[in-house]
Image (cartoon, rainbow, N blue to C red):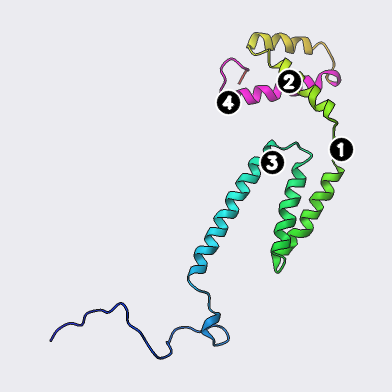
């Protein structure tokens, strides 16, 4: 007596005893391939979110809520059947919030960027101490913008590890 060889291409002509769908029809069950498709969508969505987060860093603060509103509105509209449809009104609220943020003119932006470039010239710790001693002679209401720029540059220098660019 010999052992049977396992056949891989076995065909069953009758109905299978496998699980049927909710309504008794086998065609309504989810195919195995849908897990891979869902995983691709999930990974794609995460990569899109990472890209949007990086994009939001480079956008002016007034336009960040517009970017978030656009993403939430489009997502809520595409997935409007179910609980994800609640993203649509949230996206509209972000648009309203963006309208309420006061926008500064481009002249203010240019002036501040020029001021940041001028203050970046004070790169050694001795120069920074002299500048801070000069700023201490004036009230905070007058020098708050200069102090804010200097603090931002010091934090950025510590984060990037530039030696001698500021105190860490």
Of the residues under marks 4 and 2, which one precedes in the sequence?
A: 2
The CA span between labels 3 and 1 is: 18 Å
Residue 157 picture location, percent across and down: 62, 22
- Within-10-Å neighbours for mark 4: few <14, some 14–19, many 20+: few
Residue 165 picture location, percent across and down: 61, 17
Quadrant in the picture for residue 108 = top right
Q: Secondary structure at mark 3?
A: helix
Depth check, front residue: 165 or 34: 34
> Does the magenta segment cover residue 130?
no
Of the residues under marks 2 and 3, which one precedes in the sequence?
A: 3
Q: Which mark is residue 160?
A: 4
- Within-10-Å neighbours for mark 2: few <14, some 14–19, many 20+: some
Name the residue at the left extreme.
1
The magenta region covers 141-166
Q: Indicate left or right for 52 with 21 as reference.
A: right
The CA span between labels 4 and 1 is: 31 Å
Q: Secondary structure at mark 1?
A: loop
Of the residues under marks 4 and 1, which one precedes in the sequence?
A: 1
**Quarter the C terminus occupies:** top right
Of the residues under marks 3 and 4, which one precedes in the sequence?
A: 3
Residue 52 picture location, percent across and down: 65, 45
Quadrant in the picture for residue 140 = top right
Per the image, the residue denoted by label 1 is 102
Of the residues under marks 2 and 1, which one precedes in the sequence?
A: 1
Residues at circles 4 and 2 in contact by the CB criterion of under 8 Å: no
Residue 78 picture location, percent across and down: 70, 62
Q: Which mark is residue 116?
A: 2
Of the residues under marks 3 and 1, which one precedes in the sequence?
A: 3
Name above or below for residue 62 compared with residue 166: below
Per the image, the residue denoted by label 3 is 56
Quadrant in the picture for residue 101 = top right
């Amino acid at each position: 007596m010999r052992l049977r060889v396992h056949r891989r291409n076995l065909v069953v002509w009758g109905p299978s005893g496998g699980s049927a769908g909710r309504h008794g029809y086998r065609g309504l069950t989810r195919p195995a391939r849908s897990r891979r498709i869902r995983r691709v969508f999930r990974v794609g969505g995460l990569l899109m979110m990472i890209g949007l987060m990086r994009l939001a860093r480079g956008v002016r603060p007034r336009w960040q809520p517009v970017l978030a509103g656009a993403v939430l509105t489009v997502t809520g509209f595409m997935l409007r059947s179910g609980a994800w449809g609640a993203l649509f009104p949230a996206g509209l609220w972000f648009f309203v919030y963006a309208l309420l943020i006061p926008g500064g003119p481009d002249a203010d932006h240019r002036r501040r960027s020029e001021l940041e470039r001028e203050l970046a010239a004070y790169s050694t710790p001795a120069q920074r101490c002299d500048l801070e001693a000069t700023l201490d002679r004036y009230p905070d209401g007058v020098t708050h913008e200069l102090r804010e720029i200097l603090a931002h540059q010091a934090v950025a220098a510590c984060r990037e590890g530039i030696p001698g660019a500021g105190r860490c």
